Image (spheres, rainbow, N blue to C red):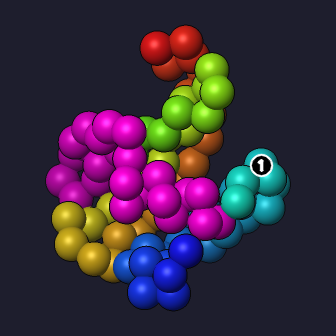
Amino acid sequence: MREKEVERVVFTKHAENMLRERGFDREFVVRAVLCPDWSSPGEGEIWYAFKRVGDKVLRVVVRGKQRPFVVITMYFDRRLRGR
């Protein structure tokens, strides 16, 4: 991944903790934000990036409509399994 792409996405302290706790790869999460399989709007500046990982779906909660995007948290969304 190019260094410029990584600069377009920043992580909150909570998101950093979730990366470690849940064992997510930072570059994979950045790719999910920059090139999601699909996305959906949230409230205000919040939106959701989704990326398939086998039969699971990674949901990344993001703040910001322009770069740099801010990752709030990320998790496998069990409700979307097999979708």
Mark 1 residue crowding within 10 angstroms, few (<14) / some (14–19) / many (20+): few
Q: Position of residue 61 (x, y in %)?
A: 43, 50
Horizontally, is 71 left or right of 36 in the view? right
Q: Which residue is mark 1?
A: 22
Horizontally, is 38 left or right of 43 in the view? right
Q: Is residue 14 above or below residue 54?
A: below
Q: Position of residue 24 (x, y in %)?
A: 72, 54
Instruction: Look at 53% across and 33% down and name the residue there.
Output: 52
Instruction: Look at 61% across and 41% down and name the residue there.
Output: 75
Q: Position of residue 1 (x, y in %)?
A: 55, 74
Q: Inspect the image, locate mark 1, and give the three-letter code of the amino acid beneath it.
A: Arg
Q: Is residue 75 visible?
A: yes
* Label 1 element class: helix
Q: Which image quadrant for residue 40?
A: top left
Q: Which residues are magenta?
A: 26-48
Instruction: Look at 80% across and 53% down and name the residue there.
Output: 23
